[in-house]
Amino acid sequence: MSVRRWISAFAGLAALTVAGGAMAAPKDPPKLIVVISVDQLSGNLYAQYRPRFTKGLRTLSDQGLVYANGWQSHANTETCPGHSTILTGKHPNKTGIPANDWIDPVSGKPVYCLSAPANSIAGGAGGLPVGPDNMRASTLGDWLKDGGAPSRVFGISGKDRGAITMAGHKADGVFWYREGFGFTTYVEPGQDGDAKLGPVRGINAQLKARFAATPPAWTYEQDVCRALERDYQVGSVAFRAKVPPAKFVFDTSPLLDDVTVDGALHLLAEQKLGQGPGVDILAVSLSATDRIGHSFGTQGPETCEQMYRLDANIGRLLDAVTGLPGGAIVVLTADHGGSDYPERSAERGFPEARRIDPGIVTRLNASLKAQFKLTEDPANFDGWGLFIVGKDRVRLPQPLRGKVAAAAVAVLKAEPDVVDAFTTEELLKTPPPRPGTPPEEYSLRERAALSTVEGRSTDVSVILRPGIAPLRAPGTGGAMSTHGSTWDYDRRVPILFWWPGSEGQERFFSIETIDIAPTLAHLIGVAPPADIDGRCLDLGGFAVAACPKPAVAAAPVEAKKAGFRWPWEKAQ
Ligand SMILES: [Zn+2]
């Protein structure tokens, strides 16, 4: 960074020079914001393929601002909570979305994170009725709309939860792809479903015609990926890792991203996004990396092929926004990270990787039933935590539930697969991490607290050892590999900012996905809600004032009293 730039940033003025000293006129803030979330694109997977990208991800990596250390800071690294942080600027404890699913305490019934029973799905496309009602935070698009801006806001994804959580409560269109139908959306009472599908009618017709003429298929495009073909045995399941897999499924192939990007390009062109009177937002969540990762792991030919296809799909999006006269900015991140399936990780130098010992549930329930003289098994495991329940999975009443939860924590801490466990009660009392603490240094308890929502979270959060996959084996309804843990392989994600004409910069300090929304809000002059968690980051290159300087947190009073000094402070 040049001295002049440093001084101007300090003075709160627009940056006038760029690194290297060449003068570049600062641009006006862009008229289009494209936010891309690549489901399950871990920081590790990005690093693995970064040298091999040649298309869109090459452009973002070479010409963009690269934060290789981006963090989904919370513990429960699932799709719904992860997406809920990206454009709200808040951790899941404030977005109200602790997990993909939870158990309703009264009925004992499972609740999907975006369940909206009063709604329906447009066109009879099938699927659960969904909507943004469960999300308690507003998004960047909502802030624009609330301020009366003439902005258009669209979301599109392979999954409903990828589209709705980023687009927010007041979007003009929120679409996700259902094979055999095309893009659909949710319909609230009193709304006209056919009218809501208007913006995707054209692309749905095109896709239908395309797949009628040429049935969808997945074949090798890369010899380097073909070279990864091999036979594997995972538990009782034997399979050959290859493309196409033994059973081709559209949703677990790169074609899901291909059509999602087709849909995004259609919205850009037909809605003339970025060409209206206000700043427009297009949120794109690409689901194929996650679906392929779950089904085949991340280190086989399947994810390899997907990475190259993803690169090409991102390139199509960049090409579409490059010539827009009002300018555009693209942000790419992920809802969570991931890892390979434990059996292959164990073969590759991490022998601790394995699936959890299922006996943990039997032992825990036997202990709790004896301690509290219960007739039903009280511990209902749900991936990364457990609900304390009675008959028909209805949550036990308080104060019994709290007592059983506390006893469960004690039992779990003695289990070899468990590093730690916390009750929801103690997590709700846990203060947020001290401002300025790097997200990789957050304690396990702080991470779990950022995922905790009263009435929705599990009664006990369970932190398994690194590399231990939770319950359900492949072939029994469980995934081959998964994510959702508290560990950094599931928390670290890339965060890349790019715009036409931007100059590449590597920014190695850690930031969080909650920083994306306040950064974009500052760029376009919108005020986020006062209770936002994220902070504004200076992007440079645009004719806007520097972000307000964050308040510096004082050293704890106790530490000062105890004679604490920074190394550079003179002894007194
Ligand atoms: Zn997933």
Image (cartoon, rainbow, N blue to C red):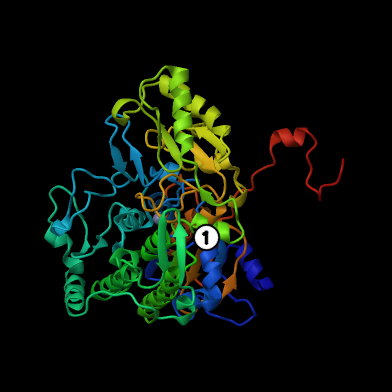
Residue 297: where, in percent of width, then height? 45, 61
- Ligand 1, seen in the image, is in the quarter at bottom left
**Residue under the image location 31 percent in, 62 percent down:** 158
- Name which quarter of the figure residue 404 lies in: top left
Quarter occupied by the N terminus: bottom right
Residue 177 versus residue 277: which sits nearer the camera?
A: 177
Badge 1, how many Cα within 10 Å: few under 14, some, many 20+?
many
Number of marks in picture: 1
> What amino acid is labelled 1 in the image?
Arg
Image vertical order of residue 490 relative to residue 279, above or below: above
Residue 59: where, in percent of width, then height? 49, 78
Is any part of residue 336 visible from this angle?
A: yes
Is residue 559 toward the left or the right of residue 308 in the image? right
- Name which quarter of the figure residue 380 lies in: top left
Instruction: Identify the element where label 1 is drawn.
Output: helix
Is any part of residue 535 visible from this angle?
A: no
**Residue under the image location 59 percent in, 55 percent down:** 549
Residue 378: where, in percent of width, then height? 39, 27
Is residue 198 toward the left or the right of residue 163 in the image? left
Residue 105: where, in percent of width, then height? 33, 31
Residue 354 versus residue 103: which sits nearer the camera?
A: 354
Is residue 135 toward the left or the right of residue 505 in the image? left
Q: Is mark 1 within 8 Å of ligand 1?
A: no
Q: Which residue is mark 1?
A: 344
Q: Which residue of the protein is positioned furthest toward the top in this rendering?
A: 373
Image vertical order of residue 277 relative to residue 185, above or below: below
Quarter occupied by the C terminus: top right
